[in-house]
Amino acid sequence: MYQRTVLIVEDEFLIRLVLADTLADEGYDVVEAGNVLEVVAILDQRKVDAVVTDVDMPGGLSGLDLARMISTTNLSVPVIIASGRHRPTSEEMPGDAMFIPKPYRADTIAAMVGEMTAGVERRLTA
C-alpha cells in the first residue's frame, strides 16, 4: 500500500508540530519545513503528494510564492494555503490551491488533504 507524503511548511513550531502529529496519526508520511528555502531542497529529493503552507514565511519567499512555484512545475501536487493575516484574492491564488483561514483545526486540514490526495493510490496502480 502506498503511503501518501504531505509536506508541511510552517514557521510556527507548535502549529507545525500539531499538524504533523495529526497527519501522521492519519497515516501520512509527513515532511516538515520552516521556510520556503528548505522546501526547494526537499522537493529535489522527495516526491510529495500534497503541501500545506502558511503565507507568511521568513527568508523572503511566501507560501503564495511556493504555491506558484509548485503550480508551474508540478500541477498534480495539491496545495493548501493558510493564513491568519492575509485573505488572498482569487487572482493571488495560484493553480488549484485552496485557502483556509487561521486558526484552523488540524483535523480539518487532514480531511482536506485526504480529499485532495484520494486518487493518488489509484493513479499509481493504474
Image (spheres, rainbow, N blue to C red):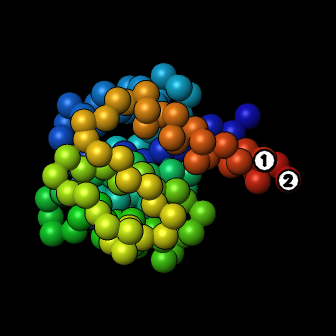
Label annotation for residue 2 = none
As drawn, 33 above or below 28:
below
What residue is disc 2 on?
A: 126
Residue 113 in percent (x, y) is at: 52, 42
Q: Which residue sits at x=68%, y=49%?
A: 120
Give the quarter of the image for residue 107: top left
What residue is disc 1 on?
A: 122
Q: Nearer the viewer, residue 43 or 120?
A: 120
As drawn, 8 above or below 66:
above
Residue 30 in percent (x, y) is at: 45, 38
As drawn, 9 above or below 28:
below
Residue furthest top in the image = 25
Asked whether the beta carbons under mark 1 and mark 2 sit within 8 Å of each other, the answer is yes
Q: Is residue 34 left or right of residue 42?
A: left
CA gap, disc 1 and disc 2: 6 Å
Q: Which residue sits at x=61%, y=46%?
A: 117
- Tell me the kind of residue under disc 1: Arg
Q: Which residue sits at x=58%, y=48%?
A: 116
Characterize the local packing of mark 1: few (<14), some (14-19) or many (20 or more) Cα atoms within 10 angstroms: few
The N terminus lies in quadrant:
top right
Residue 76 in percent (x, y) is at: 60, 63
